[in-house]
Amino acid sequence: MKKDNVVICNVCGLKSIDDQNAVFIHAHKNNQEVDICTSCIPSVIHGSGMVVKSNEEIAEEA
């Protein structure tokens, strides 16, 4: 999720301002654009998309 030029991981909630070395992958889930940090990619690839939270869920947590 992107908010105010900050990228937030839709899995773990990592913010790009908290880790300048973080890399994010842009993806789609349920017709919604989401961003996933590379640390969380294995859980999505080997697990399921169920770990990816909606932008609304991430906004509530932030």
Image: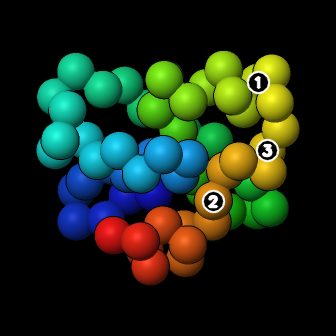
Horizontal side of 6 relative to 36 (left or right) equals: left
- The span from disc 1 to disc 3 (Cα, nearest Å) is 8 Å
Identity, as a three-letter code, of the amino acid under mark 3? Gly
Residue 50 appears left or right of 38 = right
**Which mark is drawn over residue 53?**
2
Q: Residue at x 33, y 70 (%)?
A: 62
- Marks 2 and 3 sit apart, C-alpha to C-alpha, by 9 Å
Residue 60 lies, in percent from the top left, at: 44, 79
Q: Is residue 25 visible?
A: no
Callout 2–callout 3 Cβ contact below 8 Å? no
Q: Quadrant of the N terminus?
A: bottom left
- The disc at residue 45 is 1
- Image x and y of residue 26, in percent: 54, 39
Q: Residues within 10 Å of mark 2 (few under 14, many from 20)?
A: many
Q: Three-letter amino acid code at disc 1?
A: Ile
How crowded pointer 3 is (Cα within 10 Å; few <14, some 14-19, many 20+) is rated as few
Classed neighbour count for the residue bearing mark 1: other residues with Cα under 10 Å, few (<14), some (14–19), many (≥20): few
Mark identifier at residue 49: 3
Whole-percent x, y for residue 57 in the image: 55, 72
